[in-house]
Amino acid sequence: MLSDVLLIAGKDLRVELRSRIALNQVVPFALLVLVLFGFALDADSSTLATFTPGLYWVAVVLAALLAVHRSVSLEDGDGADEGLLMSGLHPASVFLGKAVALIAELLLLALVLLGGVLILYGAPVDDVTLLLLTTVAAVIGVGAAGTLYGALLSGQRARETILPILLLPVLAPVVIGASRAFGDAMGSVATDGWSWLLSLTGFAMLYLAVGSVAHGALMEEA
Amino acid sequence: MTTTQEVVETGRFDTATGSRTTRMLGWALIVGLIVLLWLAFVATDPDIRIDAASGDEIGQFDAVRLIYVHVPMAIVAYTAFTVTAIGSVMVLLRRSVWWDLVAGASAEIGAVASALTLITGSIWGRPIWNTYWRWDDVRLMTTLVLFMLALGYLAVRRLEGSAESRARRAAIVGILLVINSIIVNRSVEWWASQTLHQQSTITDAAIEDLTLFTFMYAIVFGLAGYVWLLIKGFRVAWLERQNERFGLVEALEQRRAEAERTDAVNAAVDTGTGDQS
Amino acid sequence: MTHVGYLVAGWGSAFLIIGIYTWVLIQRGNRLAKRVPVEKQRWMSARDEAERIGDA
């Protein structure tokens, strides 16, 4: 089971290492979003610092849409999805493998962006542990939900337009929770960031579980 | 004069989605609507109370009459999405065509009703809360996200693919509709940690008998309207499905007949020119 | 009566939107009914052919 998961994750990550789509296109896109927020808010550093948690997570979620898209399109061409079906791997393993690869990419993206907001927006950091744990938990949630909804739309020509309207409302709780926890970690919001971290962990666990179960039904009909 | 039995047996109907049941329910709804309007605008009193301390008139005044349309809409919306979720489970468990169509038709009504819940609520909120929208109100946010999730669900139903794969995808999204709205509800409640919404007005002893009756009547009327729309929606969804399965065959036959006619004409023309050369 | 504008807007939008939805739904049904053979138009009379999703 675990080796199957790593097999699929390794496959996706190897493709990424060779194509560098996430690194060369998704990360620059996310950084551009951060720069645009700066322009839109008149580069007022106190405003930017106040709203850093929210702006950061909006940027992550928007970039995640592109990453999900990329992750699904890996299985689109050359009958790759049939290959996966024929491989005899358990659907849950396939789901978790794809999720792990996507989460790894998103984690890299989130860390680069974190450096971006710390430098560009001059956001203060009170609690590094909370900041990093929140990033990990939220990214796992985004990656799990993204993989599930991506699989739902695999092979669809309309995927580019439907994925955002499906996924963004689903990720709204992650944006709420992660922004709150970041607000606490950056000292801009008086709230208990650790309890938000707990709820983000719950979201991540739930979507990993739901995705593992639902992926069976999705692969069957492919 | 054909009897209902004959109509069912021969499959002939006077309209595409009408039947004796929907016609009778439809007439009952029209009468019921007149009664509802009379109750909501004539029979019931405006909400005016006297403030004990200052002696001033307080309350919602006539704006309370918006509640008679707002609350039934909300209840219809949540009922409709519950039916969609139940249908989705039945699709996955039993591969039931009937439940798939019911789930789809119900989600459409749910989307309309949740949009109207938001619209009528905003219009009511403007004079009463002094704002159209509150970000910190958990019911507003949950209904808004639920509306957007429903749009996503309806988009998934329109995806390409075999009938089976579409039904299965839609069923998964339909079940997630409920899971997601619960998560959103929990997280917004925690995020906002306060609400302007009136908690359990129904059990409030101060509410007058006729007001309470109108309230209940409006909810029952709304649910009856939901049933009528659901029957109509199911019949349209069934026709859509049947059109995909048989409509194309008919269209192909027509095309073929047309092609044969053109071929005959062409053949005649060909022989004509052949004779001349 | 107070708040007349709000009442008209609220009840009016409800009537309007439900009315439009109902009309569109019935039109959709009428259009489709022209393309589907009469004996297959109703679930009650044509259900036996396909009770389960995926049945031909």
Image (cartoon, coloured by chain):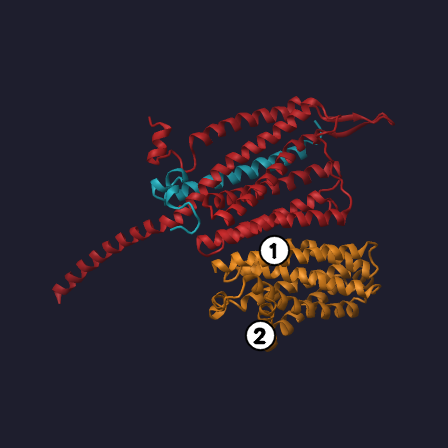
Chain colours: A orange, B red, C cyan
- Image quarter (top left, top right, bottom left or bottom right) of the N terminus of chain B: top left
Provide the chain ID for the residue under circle 2: A
Which of the 4 quarters of the picture holds residue B224? top right
In front of the other: label 1 or label 2?
Answer: 1
Label 1 in the same subunit as label 2: yes
Q: Position of residue A146 (x, y in %)?
A: 61, 60
Mark sitting on residue A210: 1
Q: Is mark 2 on a helix, strand or loop?
A: helix
Residue B218 as seen in the image, left or right of residue A187: left
Is A101 in front, or is A5?
Answer: A5
Q: Is mark 1 on a helix, strand or loop?
A: helix
Amino acid bearing label 2:
Val
Is A105 in front, or is A50?
Answer: A105
Q: Crowding at label 2, few (<14), some or many (≥20) Cα neighbours within 10 Å?
A: some
Task: Please say if A175 is above or below B70.
Answer: below
Provide the chain ID for the residue under circle 1: A
Amino acid bearing label 1:
Val
Residue at horizontal 65 percent and vertical 66 percent from the top: A103
Q: Position of residue B105 (x, y in %)?
A: 51, 43
Task: Please say if B24 is above or below B149.
Answer: above
Residue A181 as seen in the image, left or right of residue B20: right
Q: Mark 2 points at which residue?
A: A15
Q: Crowding at label 1, few (<14), some or many (≥20) Cα neighbours within 10 Å?
A: some
**Disc with the residue nearer the chain's start (1 vs 2):** 2
Residue at horizontal 71 percent and vertical 67 percent from the top: A110
Which of the 4 quarters of the picture holds residue A181? bottom right
